[in-house]
Image (cartoon, grey):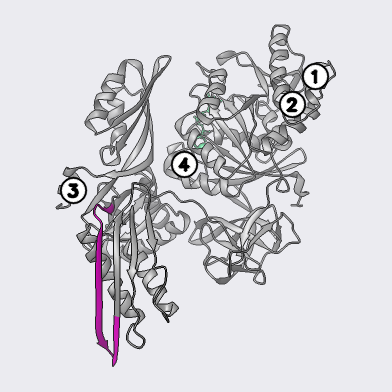
Amino acid sequence: MKSPNLEKIRNIGIISHIDAGKTTVSERFLYYAGEIHKLGEVHDGLATMDWMDQEQERGITITATSTTCLWKDIRINLIDTPGHIDFTIEVERSLRVLDGALAIFSAVDGVQPQSESVWRQADRYHVPRICLINKMDRIGADYRAVLEQMGQRLNARPVLMQLPDGLENDFAGVIDLLEMRHLSFADADLGATVEVGDIPDDLRAAAVEAREALVEAAADWDDELIADFLEGREVSAKRLVQALRKGVLACELFPVFLGSALRNKGVQPLLDAVGALLPSPLDAPSVKARHPDGDRTVLLDCDPDGPFCALAFKVLSDEGRKLTYLRIYSGSLEAGGVLYNATRDCEERAARLFRMHAHKRERLDFARAGDIVAATGLKQALTGDALTDPDHPLQLEGLTVAEPVVSLAVEPRKVQDRDKLMHSLEKLQWEDPTFRVREDESTGQTVLTGMGELHLDVVLTRLKRDFGVEVNAGQPQVVYRETVTAPVTHREIFERDLENRSHKGEVTLHLKPLPRGEGVRYRWPEHFAAGLPEEIRLALEETLQQATQSGVLAGYPLVDLEIAVKDLPYEAGATSAMGIRAAAQRGMMEAARRAKPTLLEPVMGLEITVPNECSGKVLGGLQQKRGRVEGHAAQGAIDIIKASVPLSEMFGYMTELRSASQGRGTFTMEFSHYDLAPPATLARFGL
Ligand SMILES: Nc1nc2c(ncn2[C@@H]2O[C@H](COP(=O)(O)OP(=O)(O)OP(=O)(O)O)[C@@H](O)[C@H]2O)c(=O)[nH]1
Ligand SMILES: [Mg+2]
């Protein structure tokens, strides 16, 4: 495949709440661009982008899948992301490397909780967006309500680019407000032919009014536009697009399109908009990198002739081999090229390069700045690693990884599978930074930790299918945190002779509780003892950091406390790194024990949608779960209830909600914060 000019490339992601239609839209993109020759539907398990067998069976996207298509002269590199909160890392990693995004909302369900989360993630990475209000064919479709919610819930300024011709079952096409024309999509060839016509008379007045609002939004980005408009001069579609594009790139305007992906309506205008309104790699802001040996910041432009620099944003274990997805920010790379992994301080070889088409690969000899490609042969690289030219090492900002909160103990069904289990879990961990594995020292069990029940269920199914390991799994458990509730000062001295050398270490620590959500704060003495060698200081820092990984009550990580090193005397010839390690470790344990330790439990933010008449029952249920209702509003026949509830009360809630709402209620839940665990929980841990 020939590489097009950089200004013709769009690296974009599709993001939304679960089920809004991301995969259905992606499938149409590929079909109309001629990349695939048959439309596959999600509910038939045939969508190209949902290639994993579990995705096809469950009818949801689990992993972010990247593909590419050529629309007119624009090369669109596309990542379809999952909407379910358990797979939030997939959205995070995609937004970290993409230049633009398409946000989809359901015309019936509006701005749902997960749409809000992905919108905030996109805000965080400053990713320009265009939007689609999908499912205009469904009963109850109300695009105006969605526009309003975009303002209220997302604090965003939507710009309506189209009006619908008909609604619900009668949704027949759209009025294009830029060109002032009617577009419909021929049923005979699955919408592939776009029929262009005049605006029907009964829609003309509304179209003129809606175009005015569009011109007004564009005018903020083109000083003379409003004057021309008021004086009756023609304002061309081209000029409007130029102005709107500026607003989009600044993340201040969000053009909104209308459609029904399933009915094959409204997709091509979106493809056009990707090219016209979203940034090319050249429009994206320069990427900030750091020299590994200091704080010096380097700004990288998207330049194929610059020093090579790429971010590994996804690792897949494909038939046991590692496939590493790279976003190349600067420079070029040939297949077989040697790279420096700045995160792990080692050299690696990108043996082969591929452009990915969902799960199919196309071999490349060469890749360059602006591209998204996959490589084999990188042995060390994990998600978030920076890969650079060995002569120009650079560090890149990694990813924000959400803390997993649900755990599950497993053991292999067959004793002889033990090694295979550990090996397979290691590979699954390569892929997913929100999936963790640890050995519980007290029980000898293998404990898996993930974002939620679904996440862990997917992992267990993969263990069985992809790796042939069957396991017995316990009940899902909450991942607690430990903290301290009283300030304590503790002095610890260690002294021992080993191999004819005396090892001494002394440290005085002061622990202090911090407010919730503060994490761990360290304070070092203003002046370390004179002559204190670097290795002693490092030994102390490392030991204290390790000690916070496993608390004194039940081995959960310690949070929300300050650890101040008050004194660290140094005696040349006697104080050793080993001595300091021993003193710091025992000192931390003793201090934490005396500082009245306690447990914190994860509390989840919940949004529940139920028919009005079922609200009472649902609210009653929440009360029994120590839930706090934070909002309760009616939207027609539906009530939306917002609440925060401890995660430990939420296992199996789906079944409970179904029975309380005759199967009509739905809910989403997302980690909110840690809070003090109740006495009953403490009692379970013998506290
Ligand atoms: N009526 C109607 N249904 C649609 C439309 N678009 C998608 N659907 C259906 O909605 C369901 C979900 O669509 P998907 O494309 O899987 O949604 P998604 O956003 O990819 O979902 P996740 O990947 O699980 O987050 C499927 O059954 C689709 O057929 C539409 O425009 N109208
Ligand atoms: Mg999907």
Which sits earlier in the primary sequence, circle 4 or circle 1? 4
Check contact, mark 4 vs mark 1: CB within 8 A. no
What is the C-alpha distance between the residues marked 2 and 3? 61 Å
- Comes first in the chain, label 1 or label 3: 1
Q: Mark 3 or mark 4: which comes first in sequence?
A: 4
Query: Under tag 2, what secondary structure?
Result: helix
Q: Secondary structure at mark 1?
A: helix
Give the mark, 4 or 2, whose residue is nearer the N terminus: 4
Alpha carbon separation for disc pair 4 and 1: 50 Å
Q: Amino acid at mark 4?
A: Glu
Q: Tell me whether the residue at label 2 lies in contact with that at label 3, contact meaning CB atoms closer than 8 angstroms.
A: no
User: Upstream in the sequence, badge 2 or badge 3?
Assistant: 2
Is 148 located above or below residue 408 in the figure?
A: above
What residue is shown with label 1? 229
Label number found at residue 219: 2
Q: Give the residue pinned by disc 4.
A: 55
- For badge 1, the amino acid type reads Phe
**Magenta segment, which residues?**
482-504
Q: Separation of disc 3 and disc 4 at Cα?
A: 39 Å
User: Which residue does the image show at 68% across and 26% down from the upper left?
Assistant: 189
Along the line of sight, the residue nearer the viewer: 574 or 398: 574
Question: SS at mark 4?
Answer: helix
- The amino acid type of the residue labelled 3 equals Leu
**Above-or-below relation of 153 to 383:** above
